[in-house]
Image: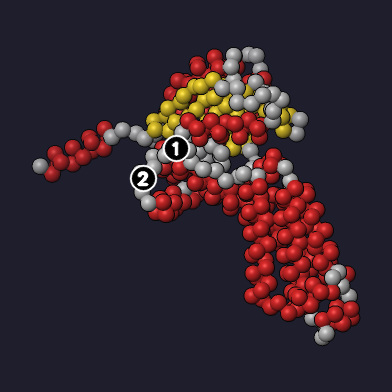
Amino acid sequence: MSALGEDEDVSSEVAAPLPDVVVGLVAAPGAAAELAGRLAPELAAELAAQHPEVRWDVRAVEDGLVRPPADDDAIVAATRARLLAEDWDLAVALTDVPLEVSRRPVVGTASPLHGVALISLPALGAVGRHRRALHTAVDLVRALVGTADGEVDAGDRAALGRRLRQLAADDDGSDGLLYTARVLSGNLRLLVGMVRANQPWRLAIRLSRALTAAVAAGVFALITADVWRLADSFGGVRLTVVALGSVVAVVVTLIIGAELWERPRGRRARKQVLLFNVATATTVVIGVLSLYAVLFLLALAGGLLLVVEPLFAEGLGHDAHLSDYLELAWLVCSLATVGGALGAGLESDDAVREAAYTHRSGGAGDAPG
């Protein structure tokens, strides 16, 4: 009896249906739409052969998405909007718009954070376009789910299988806090990869107006005697509160001002939107903290070089020590960061989005021949 029961358990486990990963194949009208119609079943078969942990449902739809001229950021945003509206897990857009990176034509680009990939048809060439498009689409989907080109070992494949099943799992309607905790704990590795792909430490460099405003505010604060006395009298607790407030001000300005926060439009997209929002917030926070650290070092160096000790001691009313310079740098850095928040408010939404998200791109020579 026990052997029979074990056989029934095994057969029922084998017969259990695989969860679905829905991939939207969005194509511009015309030749791109015709190509997408032929690619959809082939892409599903190829993905199923490489990753049988889930059932791949590839749906081809016709949508121009944007009006040319348009860059990849605009196409990604439009594809992301279609993904959320259709409740897909991933989306690949076939576009007639030529894409370039550093003046080099780009065949495909993937944004794991958005769950969106682009294929530029002009970069595929005229010969063997169908085969090159299929290979590129497979590589881009693998990039979206967290695998690099090439083979993966058994441990990585097991982790990938879990990730794919988590991606395919529908929201079960559980409590919001419990659901959030489960999603984040189950997708921690994926979340870390999404944040790393965004290169958040480069955020401040790309936001020129915010950086300029921060430096200007820091220089003004550094030469103000009232700021010297405030830094000396604030103490560690107040300086910490001011520092946290300045970081929060920049983070909120960037996220709300550029509309980086998303709301789920369907049950299937709830997990993906949650990961997107957490990754976005983490990216911006790390980027702002990187800016804060750089401003602190600049403020400390500026204070040691420009605020001479006799004048500093006279302004403080007591001898100036290294701890006083550190406190001054701390407060000046916080004030400069608030100035960065004002500068961030002057940045265009497109500039902020471009700074917050880095797309993984492949040049024309990277596509399979």
The label shown at residue 173 is 2
Q: Is residue 118 above or below residue 114?
A: above
Which image quarter is the C terminus in?
Answer: top right
Give whichever of 195, 332 is nearer the camera.
332
Q: Report if residue 132 is visible in the image.
A: no
Q: Quadrant of residue 324?
A: bottom right
Residue tagged 1: 266
Residue visible at 55% across and 17% down? 33
Q: Secondary structure at mark 1?
A: loop
Q: Report if residue 13 is visible in the image.
A: yes
> Could you say where residue 155 lies in the image, as x and y percent from the top left?
44, 45
Q: Amino acid at mark 1?
A: Gly
Q: Amino acid at mark 2?
A: Gly
> Could you say where residue 14 lies in the image, as x and y percent from the top left?
27, 34
Q: Is residue 63 above or below residue 184?
A: above
Q: Is residue 323 above or below residue 110?
A: below
